[in-house]
């Protein structure tokens, strides 16, 4: 009997939380994802940071190379999503979220 998709996701996220530093995290994601997937995730976080700082879509696109569709999706997640971007951005700022 295999794990359900929800259980598989929980195991993945729990595994990520076990990583101790940037080097371990980098090695895990290099093994887990394609370089393109890692780059896309990094770009989305960069977009979220710039949106959080009040940058306009054109400036964000110029700085990150992200399409307007990607920027719009990240903006929707920032405003109406599960709070993941807000948690990371808040922790980067030293806020307790």
Image (cartoon, rainbow, N blue to C red):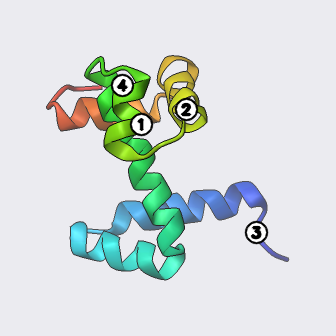
Q: Between disc 4 and disc 1, whose residue precedes?
A: 4
**Disc 4 vs disc 1: Cβ atoms closer than 8 Å?**
no
Q: Measure the alpha-carbon separation of dots 3 and 2.
A: 37 Å
Mark 4 and mark 1: Cα distance apart in space:
11 Å
Distance, label 2 to label 1, CA atoms, is 7 Å
For residue 22, above or below residue 81? below
* Residue identified by numbered label 3: 3
Question: In the rendered image, which residue does mark 2 sit on?
Answer: 68
- Along the viewing direction, whichever of 10 and 24 lies nearer the viewer: 24
Dot 2 falls on a residue whose secondary structure is helix
Which numbered mark, 4 or 1, is in the foreground of this view?
Answer: 1
> Which residue is the site of mark 4?
51
Residues at marks 2 and 4 touching, judged by CB atoms closer than 8 Å: no
Dot label at residue 32: none
Badge 1 or badge 3: first in the primary sequence: 3
Q: How many marks?
A: 4
Residue 20, image x, y percentages: 24, 68
Residue 61 disc label: 1
Question: Which of the two discs, 3 and 2, labels the residue nearer the N terminus?
Answer: 3
Q: Are marks 2 and 1 in contact (CB under 8 Å)?
A: yes
Which quadrant, please, contains the N terminus? Answer: bottom right
Q: Is residue 10 shown left or right of residue 17?
A: right
């Amino acid at each position: 009997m295999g794990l359900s998709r929800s259980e598989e996701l929980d195991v993945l996220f729990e595994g990520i939380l076990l990583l101790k530093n940037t080097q371990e995290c980098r090695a895990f994601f290099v093994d887990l994802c394609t370089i393109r997937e890692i780059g896309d995730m990094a770009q989305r976080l960069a977009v979220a940071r710039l949106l959080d700082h009040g940058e306009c879509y054109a400036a964000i696109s110029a700085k990150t190379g992200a399409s307007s569709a990607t920027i719009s999706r990240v903006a929707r997640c920032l405003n109406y999503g599960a709070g993941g971007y807000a948690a990371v951005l808040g922790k980067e700022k030293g806020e307790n979220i």
